[in-house]
Image (cartoon, helix red, strand yellow):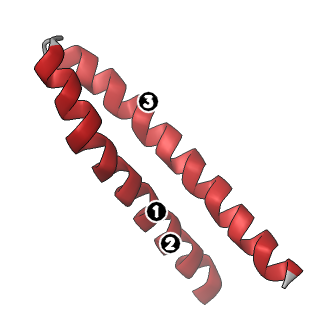
């Protein structure tokens, strides 16, 4: 039970790290290429952010499966 909780905590911390990296990269590109106004900010909040969250969980799962298999 305790080992399982530690594994999940490591998984969530790793996922959070991946999300932060993706968020900063997206913010850098967003500020460089997308004009700033209310509509683009809402698009970032309601469209791009859920995609980044899903992508970070997917990448974290794939990384853990890769390390488990090798």
Secondary structure beneath disc 3? helix
User: Disc 1 designates what residue?
Assistant: 57
User: Which image quadrant: the C terminus?
Assistant: bottom right
Location of residue 41 with respect to 49 vertically, above or below = above
Q: Which residue of the protein is positioned furthest toward the top in this rendering? A: 36
Location of residue 33 with respect to 66 vertically, above or below = above
Secondary structure beneath disc 1? helix
Residue 70 visible? The answer is no
Secondary structure beneath disc 2? helix
Q: Is residue 66 found left or right of 38 in the rendered image?
A: right
Question: Within 10 angstroms of label 2, few (less than 14), some, or many (20 or more) residues?
Answer: some
User: Disc 2 designates what residue?
Assistant: 61
Give the tally of numbered discs.
3
Between the C-alphas of marks 2 and 3, the distance is 21 Å
Q: Quadrant of residue 15?
A: bottom right
User: Which image quadrant: the N terminus?
Assistant: bottom right
User: Disc 3 designates what residue?
Assistant: 24
> What's the residue at 87%, 79% (across, down)?
2
Q: Is residue 67 found left or right of 23 in the rendered image?
A: right
Residue 10 horizontal/vertical position (percent): 72, 63
> What's the residue at 41%, 35% (across, down)?
23
Question: Within 10 angstroms of label 3, few (less than 14), some, or many (20 or more) residues?
Answer: few
> What's the residue at 22%, 23% (across, down)?
41
Say if mark 2 contacts mark 1, CB within 8 Å: yes
Q: Quadrant of residue 4?
A: bottom right
Between the C-alphas of marks 1 and 3, the distance is 16 Å
Location of residue 62 with respect to 70 vertically, above or below = above
């Amino acid at each position: 039970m305790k080992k399982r909780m530690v594994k999940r905590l490591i998984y969530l911390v790793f996922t959070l790290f991946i999300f932060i990296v993706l968020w900063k990269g997206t913010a850098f590109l967003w500020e460089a290429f997308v004009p700033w106004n209310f509509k683009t900010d809402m698009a970032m909040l309601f469209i791009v952010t859920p995609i980044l969250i899903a992508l970070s969980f997917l990448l974290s799962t794939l990384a853990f499966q890769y390390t488990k298999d090798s």
